[in-house]
Image: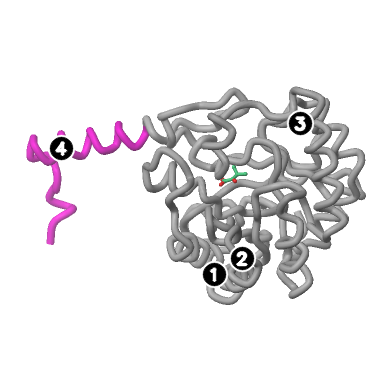
């Protein structure tokens, strides 16, 4: 692993070399530092924080201030990975000038290297302006959780020809506008492959099969720290939720049974 800072140019070069891009979410200093030390290419400070960190049912209610707080904690820890701040619901949809000011805060105050914005070709004016003023943008199409109301639930997108066409067109327009990468969430693997091969910028898949240029998952999901729901595409690499409960149970028992603190743990 090169120790050089990952930039948006590194992303593009990795695609050219056929080198897969590994991305995870993080919301706090310790996790971000661990991921960075282990060689993650990019950390997304996702608005999924609202669900897996805060316990909400959707991503919708997280505020810009809360996202900035998480982004600062992550940026403080990271030396190498590309840090992307996820723009929360209604922080970029109401006007282009608000989108610029809010996205700029992720860079100026959050220490992020870029921002992620949900939406396809309908978001193009906003995305183009952000890129024009110098803010690197990652697109996000397919199952976009901020549109959960409109989509009617967390379901695979782009199964029908018309929607698949919209997603392919959107991806091309996002690339033309200057996005440095695009997240493809919950779309059929054949469609993800087609989109990936028609773009020069890397696609980062989540529930979009093996042919994307990179993969992203929510860190709590891979660590077994989110027990409410496990989508089909999640692979668990640890069961930390169970470990935490076991450790806490042991501590409680030790206190109740006067086994903690021992002599050597006392002054
Ligand atoms: O908020 C998030 O974590 C995301 C990823 C799952 C792509 O948007």
Task: State the image coordinates of residue 32 (x, y, percent, origin top left).
Answer: 54, 56
Marks 3 and 1, how far apart in space? 35 Å
Q: Residues within 10 Å of mark 1 (few under 14, many from 20)?
A: many
Q: Is residue 230 left or right of residue 96?
A: left
Residue occupying image coordinates x 70% and y 42%:
141
- Residue closest to the eye, 229 or 77: 229
Label 3: which residue?
163
Label 1: which residue?
110
Query: Are the residues tagged 4 and 3 within 8 Å (C-beta)?
Result: no
Task: State the image coordinates of residue 150 (x, y, percent, origin top left).
Answer: 57, 36
**Quadrant in which the C terminus is drawn:** bottom left
Residue occupying image coordinates x 47% and y 47%:
60
Residue occupying image coordinates x 57% and y 69%:
102
- Residue closest to the eye, 157 or 259: 157
Task: Indicate which label's residue lies in the foreground, 4 or 3.
Answer: 3
Residue occupying image coordinates x 41% and y 29%:
228
Marks 4 and 3, how far apart in space? 57 Å
- Residue closest to the eye, 29 or 128: 128
Label 4: which residue?
254
Q: Is residue 193 left or right of residue 182?
A: right
Q: Which residues are magenta?
A: 243-267
Task: Indicate which label's residue lies in the foreground, 2 or 4.
Answer: 2
Eyeballing the image, is 36 above or below 155?
A: below
Label 2: which residue?
95
Task: State the image coordinates of residue 243 (x, y, percent, origin top left).
Answer: 37, 33
Cβ(mark 2) to ligand 1 < 8 Å? no
Q: Is residue 41 left or right of residue 89?
A: right
Ligand 1: give its quadrant: top right
């Amino acid at each position: 692993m090169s120790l050089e800072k990952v930039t948006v140019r590194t992303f593009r070069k990795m695609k050219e070399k056929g080198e897969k891009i590994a991305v995870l979410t993080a919301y706090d200093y310790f996790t971000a530092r661990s991921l960075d030390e282990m060689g993650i290419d990019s950390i997304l400070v996702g608005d999924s924080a609202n669900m897996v960190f805060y316990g909400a049912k959707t991503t919708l209610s997280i505020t810009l201030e809360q996202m900035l707080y998480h982004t600062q904690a992550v940026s403080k820890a990271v030396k190498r990975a590309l840090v992307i701040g996820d723009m929360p619901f209604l922080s970029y949809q109401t006007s282009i000038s608000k989108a610029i000011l809010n996205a700029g805060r992720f860079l100026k105050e959050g220490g992020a290297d870029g921002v992620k914005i949900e939406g396809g070709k309908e978001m193009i004016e906003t995305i183009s302006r952000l890129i024009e003023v110098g803010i690197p943008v990652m697109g996000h199409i397919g199952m976009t959780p901020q549109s959960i109301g409109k989509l009617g639930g967390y379901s695979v997108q782009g199964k029908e020809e018309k929607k698949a066409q919209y997603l392919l067109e959107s991806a091309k327009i996002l690339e033309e506008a200057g996005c440095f990468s695009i997240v493809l969430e919950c779309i059929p693997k054949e469609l993800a492959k087609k989109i990936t091969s028609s773009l020069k910028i890397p696609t980062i898949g989540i529930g979009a099969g093996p042919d994307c240029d990179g993969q992203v998952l929510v860190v709590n999901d891979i660590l077994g720290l989110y027990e409410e729901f496990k989508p089909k595409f999640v692979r668990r690499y640890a069961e930390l939720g169970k470990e935490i409960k076991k450790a806490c149970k042991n501590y409680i028992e030790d206190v109740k049974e006067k086994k903690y603190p021992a002599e050597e743990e006392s002054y």
